[in-house]
Image (cartoon, helix red, strand yellow):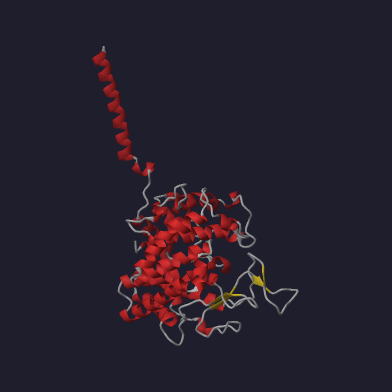
Amino acid sequence: MAPIFKYSRLVNMFKSFYMILLLLIFLPQRICPQVSVKSIKNLIIKLDKARVVADADMYLKERPVTITSFIAKRSAGGIHDYFSEGDYWWQNPADPDGPYIRKDGLTNPDNFNAHREAMRRMSIQVADLAAAYLFTGEKKYAEHAIEHLRAWFVNKNTMMNPDLKYAQAIKGVITGRGIGIIDTIHLVEVVQAIIEMEKACVIGNDDLIKLKDWFRKYTDWMFTSKFGADERDNGNNHSTCWYMQVAEYSRFTGDEKKLEYCRNNFKEELLPKQMAENGSFPLELKRTKPYGYSIFNLDAMIMTAWILSTPEDNLFKYKTLDGRSLKAALAFMYPYIKDKSTWSYPKDVMYFDDLPVRQPGLLFGGLAYNEPKYIALWKTLNPAPMVDEILRNFFIRQPVLWIGGQ
């Protein structure tokens, strides 16, 4: 009886192995769907091409407008110095002519905002025009994007100085602050547009040299100035955005030392000091806009990792000893982005109903982690919000510029 028993057991083992093999051969997509760069590119073309090209055709009719077109009377700087005022600072009813007072989360519409709006306009148009070029191959779009770049960073009559000494000033309190550096998050996608146009050889060497010189000077100022140190060490989304900017500008200028500095500090400072073990960002949850700031910081942290990661040092795979990681952060926020009604923290004091939009963290996180559900949610969200406050924190609008370069 023993040999028969052994034979029967072998037959059953073979049948089990055969069934598993069949499942692996015929059902791989149902078991583990794959998110490939090619599939994402095709999705972006399907979702974005017609809209982006239509917008680009409109932008071809508009001329560059830089900060020199708007005089900031309360600025302590000159015509080429970028100037903005802190969002949450208001006139004191008890002292109308005195220093402004803070109302966290409540944006003062009467503060000077023209330079910020001009920069955002340029960012939107340059990124859209560069994306339209990638979609169509028509050089007219790239050439018009380059006109904007020359006006902002090359032409001595219209250019912006490569520093932010007078950003987020407060009337009667201070002429500028380190946290003003967050205003230039809208230059991150501008630089990515330049990188893609450089790869396509549609931007001249003389322009490239001058553009790289501007961003090298700006990044050096961010590294060496007190304002830059204040922003880097702020501890919340401001720190994240400092690293995201330095990473992208350093990638453009080829500054490997700064890139390595950012990679190391992402692992040693940025992620472990901002993230809780459940994947949340406690400093953002304490704000009066916890939902919006949590999404914003997640987007910025994922884009920082996207910029800095290499095959040898993939920050999406990094995990602290107690399990904190970008994967955990995505898993924490995903249910709340999918269904905002489940948000178990206080609602934002303003603009809660205008979120979410097409958050880049979902797309790039979905690609990095081979997680289709993130991308499926991303493509259902609004790609072109019109509310000014939302646009202020929506800094990656043209994913084709980023996917194409990977």
Q: Is residue 389 above or below residue 11?
A: below
Q: Residue furthest top?
A: 1
In the displayed image of the protein, which residue is found farthest to the bottom?
A: 157
* Residue 21: image location, x then y, percent: 29, 35
| Residue 395 point in image, percent of width and height | 48, 66
Q: Identify the image quadrant of residue 401.
A: bottom left
In this view, 341 is above or below 400? above
> Which residue is painted at 52% across and 77% down in the image?
165
Q: Quadrant of residue 142?
A: bottom left
Q: Is residue 81 visible?
A: yes
Q: Residue at x 39, y 61 (%)?
A: 308
The N terminus - image quarter: top left
120 horizontally vs 90: left or right = left
**Quadrant of res 218:** bottom left
- Which residue in the rendered view is the most extreme toward the left? 3
Q: Nearer the viewer, residue 177 or 380?
A: 177
Question: Between residues 269 and 153, which one lies in front from this camera angle?
Answer: 269
Residue 406 position within the rendered picture, expressed as x and y whole percent measured from the top left: 34, 61
Residue 167 x/y as whole percent? 55, 75
